Amino acid sequence: MAENYDVVVVGAGVVGCSVAYYLAKEGIKVGLLERESIGSGSSTHATGFISLLGTEFTPGPSFQFGLDSYREFPSLVQELESATGMDLLYQRRPSLRLALEQSEEDLIKELMTWQKEHVAMRWISADEVHEIEPRLTPSLIGAVYEDESAQLDSYRLNLSLATGAEKLGGETIFRKVTGLLSEGDRITGVRTESGDLSCGTVVIAAGLWSPPFQRDLGFPVPVGALKGERLLLKYDGDPLQVLISSPKRGHMISRLDGFLSVGSTGGRDYDNDQLYQGEDMDRVPTEMARVEIMQRAIDVFPDLENASLVEQLAGSRPLSPDRVPIIGPVPGKQGVVLATGHTTKGIHLGPITGKVVTEYIRGGCKTVPTAMEPFLPSRFAGLDQADFQTAGLDVDE
């Protein structure tokens, strides 16, 4: 006899655990299915940088979604730390998005024309940058100064969401999913290697492992694998007091555990024939990435020549063809919701994804919330082949 839940969430990364947590907060009986371990996919190697700048958000609903999720973090972190006793290493600091060449300045200023309407920011000169952090390269042009960005430990966030859901009555189940159960056009549960789970709604939040569900859904689930790598360094100098990023050189963040995170590689670091890495997770660190990341970091912060490498993290992100998450009901099917394809913004958008999916399910899956509309899977109806090359090369970390 199949085990029974109100909702079964497939995938225990940050997105899936966020969905499970917000469902459990509403008293909904939720089963969280994971084939490996909590946060074993894209979430575990993520930087945890929660910033509204960059090219990943566009004007309108996309940016609002990111802003709403950013605003969710302070209370969510407090809730999770209180409930679980974990320190999520959450920090809120000013940020600098540096321009070291003219193309970066042009891009940053172009984005500022609309971003400054929503976020407290201003362009500052190289002299002003060096007043804030004199150790940065003398060759920089300037930067946009943002009054506040945030960063936390992505794995701790992931684990605390799963633990928080369990404390609210959710159940985590470690099994490999082999397919979906259905009756006509309604999905009625999940088939696993060791038994079936029946439910009212299935949420597919399986990241890179979402496309195999196309077989049972009869609808495209276009998610590709974009590999990324970053480094944790031990640097004996004073920690950075601002969160630093650059369009072409990535991030540089002094974490609250004392390590300096630098990176990460994205689409810009690969040739076209290397970009699409397949359907599975690639956790193998490469010397090419290590050398490239360190050189970029030293370009920004020359004294990092004296830093030592502690850890190199590698993994793949779930890339959608338009770099926009895929969230919502599947056309032609009842009882199933997708929450996948968050590309490099899974940590940032996990909470708001959990909230909007919960809102939809609480309403009986009858009315699509306004915040969900820009991300609906229906935009891929009739898609024969996804273009992950173009999308990947446009990724900005």
Image: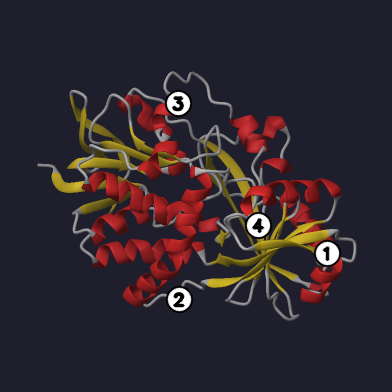
Q: Earlier in the sequence, mark 4 or mark 1?
A: 1
Using a 10 Å C-alpha cutoff, classify the residue at mark 1 as few (fewer than 14 neighbours), some (14 to 19) or many (20 or more): some
Q: Give the CA separation, mark 3 to mark 1.
A: 44 Å
Residue under label 2: 87
Q: Amino acid at mark 1?
A: Ser
User: In the image, is 79 to the left or to the right of 281?
Assistant: left
Up-down: is 231 above or below 222?
below
Q: Give the CA separation, mark 4 to mark 2.
A: 22 Å
Residue at image point 63% right, 37% down: 392
Q: Amino acid at mark 2?
A: Asp
Residue under label 4: 230
Q: Secondary structure at mark 4?
A: strand
Q: Earlier in the sequence, mark 2 or mark 3?
A: 2
Image x and y of residue 377, in percent: 40, 32
Image x and y of residue 18, in percent: 37, 56
Tell me the tag on residue 380: 3
